[in-house]
């Protein structure tokens, strides 16, 4: 019975994936991809990975979908749909992809026995950091260097996107996100939802220490509220030359690095926390990171500057 | 067949479908979408590894789960950068994919 | 008492699923975007509402019950706004009668 649910889910996912690749219209492909992201977050629930399910729904489906939809709207007049390659190339590509998929399937079907797992090690040491959610413990304690470098990647992505600004617009604001047609419904949504959304975002970050949730999930909800307000024309995209904005972008990673160096003096290693204070330090770093992630995700969706700076 | 094995096969199929789209489509935005499909499949493999490695009172090994959360966020950042590059490329007057490439600039003195 | 509550849950959740089924059939069978939206709202409002109502007696404490109700209210609000936006898009892109 339970396997039936999984089978239906897999069938839906494969349909969405085939639709994403084969449908003619670009925007239909993006919508199919968003549907796929939401279905995948259900799969993560079925695999008992609630933290990943939240991230997939928020970032994988939501934020990525928004970036792609925005690109569709701006590409439409410019880029013509390219011609597909001939049948020979198509068959060769299909064969190659099928061989790759078959190889991966063979790996899935012959797992090593016993299956390698670090769950026991994670469980053994979790009391030292005082967190109840093992995924947050891995992200911010055991593998905190990975998480720190990932934040650096996010900052670099913002710098990369900003670097694509044409010279004339440098320092100005990104292109407006608002719709060409005013809509009362969107306006109402953007006025009523953000207070609740901000509470939910903060709740996800705070709750992430002991229950599913965390920095990314909460930060993405905060970013979504900001983007919603920009879409309804209640907030303007900020000019990228603003010092305050740039400080917000690096605030989270800077706090993380500072906590890392403080670890050298307090317990001897970069990014190690003294056991008695581990939880407060981690929650403080998470709060700072969530703020920066919200700003960074909003800026990545908004894109490079498209207006000259106002004097 | 157990649920993780089923989803593992689904992940393999996702990678295959994404790879096909990556080769099939000449337009850059469709390539980015297809590449994200490959990414979704790759992330799902981590989910299988986490579920199969369940133990010590956890329903899944937390290490692959944490890695995948990092991966999803980095994939988003890469997608946003790629989309910005595509838009800028077209704004700067790049020809569509079907046109002949422009002759290189003459750099000889 | 718990038997009565369990029976209540089974009946209301089943009724909710019927609305979801009807909404899905409507989504697949109705001819244009506006009627399909109409079908979808039935699943959103009544289907989810009945399922949440049915699950309320099963909540271990008042906090989870409030969370369930909050989810229903938020889905109502988001669903209504999204339907409005889709309908406005359809109206703009289709020539009127």
Image (tube, coloured by chain):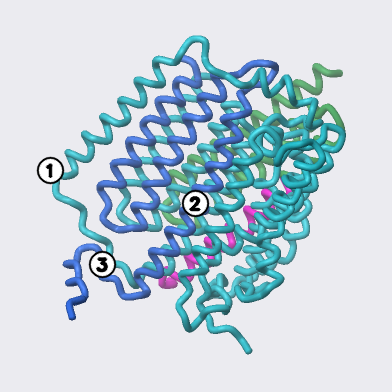
Magenta span: C72-97
Colour displayed for chain C in the image of the structure? green
The colour with which the image depicts chain A is: cyan
Q: Is residue A124 above or below residue C32?
A: above
Q: What element does badge 1 sit on?
A: helix
Direction from residue A13 to residue A101 in the image, left or right = left
What quarter of the picture does the C terminus of chain A occupy? bottom right
Residue B13: x and y in percent read 36, 32
Label 2: few (<14), some (14–19) or many (≥20) C-alpha neighbours in 10 Å: some
Q: Residue at x 50, y 20 (%)?
A: B3
Give me the residue at 36% from left, 26% from top.
Answer: A104
Residue at 17% across, 72% down = B103
Tag 1 and tag 3 share a subunit:
no
Residue A88: image tag: 1
In 3D space, how far apart are the residues under numbered discs 3 and 2 (Cα atoms)? Answer: 37 Å
Circle 2 marks a residue in which chain? C
Q: Look at mark 2 in the image and give the residue it sits on.
A: C36
Instruction: Using the rendered image of the protein, determine whether residue A234 is visible from the camera's viewpoint.
Output: no
Residue A277's spot in the image, x, y percent? 85, 38
């Amino acid at each position: 019975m339970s396997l039936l649910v999984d089978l239906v889910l897999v069938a839906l996912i494969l349909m969405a994936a085939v639709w994403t690749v084969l449908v003619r219209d670009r925007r239909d492909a993006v919508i199919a991809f968003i549907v796929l992201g939401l279905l995948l977050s259900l799969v993560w629930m079925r695999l008992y990975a609630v933290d990943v399910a939240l991230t997939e729904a928020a970032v994988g489906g939501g934020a990525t979908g928004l970036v792609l939809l925005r690109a569709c709207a701006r590409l439409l007049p410019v880029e013509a749909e390219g011609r597909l390659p001939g049948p020979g190339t198509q068959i060769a590509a299909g064969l190659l992809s099928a061989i790759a998929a078959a190889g991966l399937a063979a790996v899935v079907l012959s797992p090593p026995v016993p299956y390698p797992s670090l769950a026991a090690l994670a469980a053994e040491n979790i009391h030292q950091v005082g967190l109840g959610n093992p995924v947050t413990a891995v992200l911010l304690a055991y593998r905190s260097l990975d998480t720190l470098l990932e934040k650096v990647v996010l900052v670099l992505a913002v710098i990369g996107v900003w670097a694509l600004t044409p010279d004339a617009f440098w320092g100005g604001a990104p292109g407006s996100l608002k719709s060409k047609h005013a809509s009362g419904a969107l306006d109402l949504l953007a006025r009523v939802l953000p207070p609740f959304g901000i509470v939910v975002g903060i709740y996800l970050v705070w709750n992430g220490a002991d229950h599913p949730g965390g920095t990314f999930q909460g930060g993405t909800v905060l970013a979504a509220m900001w983007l919603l307000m920009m879409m309804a024309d209640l907030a303007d995209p900020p000019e990228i030359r603003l010092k305050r904005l740039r400080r917000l972008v690096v605030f989270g990673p800077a706090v993380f690095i500072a906590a890392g160096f403080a670890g050298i003096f307090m317990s001897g290693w970069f990014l190690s926390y003294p056991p008695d204070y581990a939880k407060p330090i981690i929650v403080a770093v998470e709060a700072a990171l969530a703020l920066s992630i919200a700003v960074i995700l909003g800026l990545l969706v908004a894109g490079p500057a498209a207006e000259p700076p106002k004097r | 067949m157990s649920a993780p094995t089923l989803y593992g096969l689904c992940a393999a199929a996702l990678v295959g479908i994404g790879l096909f789209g990556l080769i099939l489509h000449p337009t850059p935005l469709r390539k980015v979408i297809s590449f994200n499909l490959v990414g979704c499949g790759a992330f799902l493999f981590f989910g299988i590894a986490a579920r199969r490695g369940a133990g010590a009172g956890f329903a899944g090994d937390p290490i692959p789960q944490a890695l995948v959360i990092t991966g999803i966020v980095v994939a988003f950042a890469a997608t946003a950068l790629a989309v910005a590059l595509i838009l800028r490329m077209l704004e700067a007057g790049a020809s569509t994919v079907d046109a002949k490439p422009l002759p290189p600039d003459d750099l000889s003195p | 008492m718990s038997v009565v509550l369990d029976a209540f849950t089974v009946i209301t959740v089943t009724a909710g699923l019927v609305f979801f089924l009807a909404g899905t059939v409507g989504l697949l069978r109705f001819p244009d975007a506006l009627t399909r939206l109409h079908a979808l709202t039935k699943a959103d409002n009544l289907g989810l509402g009945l399922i949440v109502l049915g699950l309320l007696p099963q909540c271990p404490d008042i906090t989870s019950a409030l969370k369930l109700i909050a989810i229903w209210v938020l889905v109502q609000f988001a669903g209504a706004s999204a339907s409005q936006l889709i309908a406005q898009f359809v109206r703009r892109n289709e020539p009127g009668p």
